[in-house]
Image (cartoon, rainbow, N blue to C red):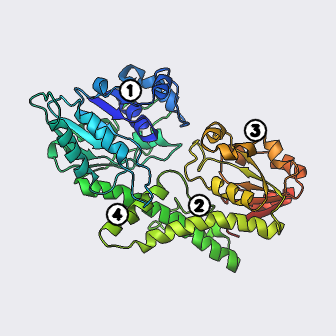
């Protein structure tokens, strides 16, 4: 099938490259010429493990351009994967989506095209985009005859750092439309993934337990709500584990054992019960805020979702409080932060806990040292006011340091020779912000081990 993808961020790029790998003819559109040039050269503008390998394997079916006129005509499916950042009131800012829909409408000329909202959008956006498409199409000076199109929703459930596997070997595929023909087209588009009949990439073998992928085929509004409901529930699990973690610290319980005991209940599951400094990234914060904003339009309150956001925000403050409890005075103290990206295996800094922790420490007069194995290049561009605190050397982070905080659980940090660094510190306080280090081992090495929850 002929596919057009608007936007080459995490979602758009992963979608486009994966579909090209499956054999579809894919053209990706981005208005950033520098990004398009980079992609044409086989280089990935974002850090995502395996993406450049997949780019190479899919190259014969893949084109990158800045032109809608080049990409949209003749497309069976047009994915719109532009950014939808939060507006001041918490609702998604849809200006980029509107511009994309208007531009797509100017180039539609196929006998039937499915325009798919791949961006995370408020419930009802499918109808809104459909209206924009039809208005813009009708305003064209020259309208080809026999052109039909319909809008569908196909929410993504990608984890940054694991996006390719989540696309090719997903838990489920959700498609929503009020037009049966759209559902048929998307069903055919995804059939190789649904049936797992494609040859796996050389660098990412098919999991042994991979079976046919469930397809949820539903209406527009339900598909849109599934995305928000799923992300809000995952955010709830993390915040719940963190709230229980604070109680565990008070009563002398081990939150990692409590979470393990909870997770073994098949009704609950162990994933997303990891206590720590909380969630970040572009999805959970934005989507929970948007869900609250949408509910308010219908005079509904979302107290559980609001509580999850409050607990998450509090975890970052608790990390600073733990340091103050240990050091008593933060002014003049040198404190190192290991990890800037909001999670491992990505350079994404959006809503990263490290940013709030660093800014809070600086505001209290501490001297901070910041390190990340991957995200420093992006950090210098996006956080220029904090760039002066960056360190290229882990040794420099530890040297004469009063405390070190593990913020992001990069494998590089977990595999450190921790015995080497304890002697470099002025006071060997180690705050484990992710509950991933062996507390007993760290204490044997000479660290004063402290956890966020305990």
Which mark is on residue 278? 2
Few, some or many residues within 10 Å of mark 3 (<14, 14–19, 20+): few
Q: Quadrant of residue 80?
A: top left
Q: Between disc 4 and disc 2, whose residue precedes?
A: 2
The residue positioned 59% from the left and 61% from the top of the image is 278
Which mark is on residue 392? 3
Label 4 to label 1: alpha-carbon separation:
33 Å
Q: Kindly report which numbered mark, 4 or 2, lies closer to the viewer in this rendering.
A: 4
Q: Between disc 3 and disc 4, whose residue precedes?
A: 4
Label 3 to label 4: alpha-carbon separation:
43 Å
Q: Which residue is mark 1?
A: 66
Q: Kindly report which numbered mark, 3 or 1, lies closer to the viewer in this rendering.
A: 1
Tag 4 secondary structure: helix
Q: Between disc 3 and disc 2, whose residue precedes?
A: 2
Q: Quadrant of residue 252?
A: bottom right
Q: Between disc 3 and disc 1, whose residue precedes?
A: 1
Which mark is on residue 294? 4
Q: Quadrant of the N terminus?
A: top left
């Amino acid at each position: 099938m002929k596919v057009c993808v608007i936007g080459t961020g995490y979602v758009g790029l992963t979608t486009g490259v994966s579909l090209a790998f499956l054999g579809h003819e894919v053209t990706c559109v981005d208005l950033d010429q520098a990004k398009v040039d980079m992609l044409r050269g086989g280089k990935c503008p974002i850090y995502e493990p395996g993406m450049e390998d997949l780019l190479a394997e899919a190259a014969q079916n893949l084109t990158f351009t800045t032109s809608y006129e080049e990409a949209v005509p003749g497309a069976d499916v047009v994915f719109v994967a532009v950014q939808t950042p939060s507006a001041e009131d918490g609702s998604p800012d849809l200006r980029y989506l509107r511009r994309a829909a208007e531009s797509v409408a100017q180039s539609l000329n196929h006998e039937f095209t499915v325009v798919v909202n791949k961006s995370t959008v408020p419930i009802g956006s499918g109808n809104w985009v459909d209206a924009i498409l039809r208005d813009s199409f009708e305003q064209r000076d020259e309208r080809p005859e026999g052109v039909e199109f319909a809008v569908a929703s196909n929410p993504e459930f990608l984890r940054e750092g694991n996006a390719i596997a989540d696309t090719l070997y997903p838990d489920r595929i959700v498609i929503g439309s009020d037009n049966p023909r759209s559902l048929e087209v998307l069903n055919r588009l995804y059939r190789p993934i649904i049936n797992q009949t494609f040859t796996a990439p050389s660098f990412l073998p098919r999991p042994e337990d991979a079976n046919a992928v469930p397809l949820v085929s539903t209406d527009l509004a339900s598909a849109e709500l599934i995305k928000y409901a799923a992300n809000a529930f995952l955010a709830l699990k993390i915040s719940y584990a963190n709230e229980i973690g604070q109680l565990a610290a008070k009563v002398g319980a081990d939150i990692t054992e409590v979470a393990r005991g909870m997770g073994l209940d098949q009704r609950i599951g162990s994933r997303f019960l990891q206590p720590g400094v909380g969630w970040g990234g572009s999805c959970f914060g934005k989507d929970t805020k948007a869900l609250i904003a949408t509910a308010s339009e219908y005079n509904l309150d979302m107290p559980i979702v609001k509580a999850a956001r409050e607990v998450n925000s509090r975890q970052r403050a608790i990390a600073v409080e733990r340091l103050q409890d240990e050091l008593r005075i933060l002014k003049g103290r040198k404190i190192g932060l290991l990890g800037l990206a909001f999670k491992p295996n990505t350079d994404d800094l959006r809503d990263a806990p490290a940013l709030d922790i660093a800014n809070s420490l600086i505001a209290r007069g501490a001297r901070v040292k910041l390190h990340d194995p991957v995200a420093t290049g992006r950090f210098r561009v996006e956080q220029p006011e904090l760039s002066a605190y960056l360190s290229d050397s882990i040794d420099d982070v530890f040297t004469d340091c009063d405390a070190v905080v593990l913020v992001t659980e990069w494998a590089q940090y977990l595999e450190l020779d921790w015995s080497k660094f304890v002697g470099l510190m002025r006071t060997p306080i180690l705050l484990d912000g992710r509950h991933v280090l062996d507390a007993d081992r760290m204490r044997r090495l000479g660290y004063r081990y402290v956890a966020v929850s305990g």
